[in-house]
Amino acid sequence: MKITHNKIGQNLNLTDSAKSDKAGGIASKSAGIGNANKADALMGSSLGESTKVELSPKAQEAKRIKELAMAAPDVDEAKVAKFRQLIDEGKYKTDAKAIADKMVDEHLEF
């Protein structure tokens, strides 16, 4: 016998797994035959026909934004070159205490 419950612990479902497995096997076999016939009917009716899909203006805008984001480079090479030069010249200074404080603050937010 299988006992299942929802997340809250109410509505216990008591079933005999042996009986349900046998019944489920018979039901799934007959459902499989029905689904195959439906799939054949859908395939046969759509041969030679085309389907037209229209996207809403909001979906078109989302698609355009996604394409722009995908086309943008992942790394800003000019910015990297600028900071590389500052580091090489010894002009890029960091404040270790400020960085540590910010890391702690960000960690405490979560």
Image (cartoon, rainbow, N blue to C red):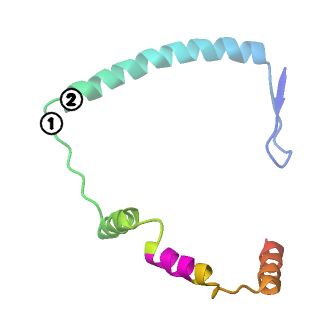
Q: Position of residue 45 (x, y in %)?
A: 21, 29
Left or right of 1? Residue 92 is left
Q: Residue furthest left?
A: 48
| Residue 69 locus on image (x, y percent) | 40, 67
Give the residue pinned by disc 1. Answer: 49
37 drawn magenta: no
Q: Is 44 placed above or below 88 here? A: above
Closer to the camera in the image, 107 or 45: 107
Exactly how many numbered labels are in the figure? 2
Disc 2, disc 1: CB below 8 Å? Answer: yes
Q: Which mark is residue 32?
A: none
Instruction: From the viewer's perspective, tell me whether residue 18 is left or right of residue 51.
Output: right
Instruction: Please provide the residue range marked out in magenta.
Output: 78-85
Front position in the image: 78 or 75: 78
Q: Determine the secondary structure under disc 1.
A: loop
Query: Where the C terminus falls, by quadrant?
Result: bottom right
Give above or below for 62 relative to 109: above
Q: Residues within 10 Å of mark 1 (few under 14, many from 20)?
A: few
Residue at 69%, 87% (x, y): give it: 93
Q: Badge 2, how many Cα within 10 Å: few under 14, some, many 20+? A: few
Question: Going 76% across and 13% down the picture, which residue do you hit?
Answer: 18
The x and y percentages for residue 104 are 83, 77
The type of residue carrying mark 2 is: Ser
Secondary structure found at label 2:
helix
Is 79 inside the magenta-drawn segment?
A: yes
Which residue position holds label 2? 45
Dominant SS of magenta comes to helix
- Residue at point 67%, 11% (across, down): 22
Question: Residue 50: percent from the left, percent from the top?
Answer: 16, 41
Q: Nearer the viewer, residue 11 or 97?
A: 97
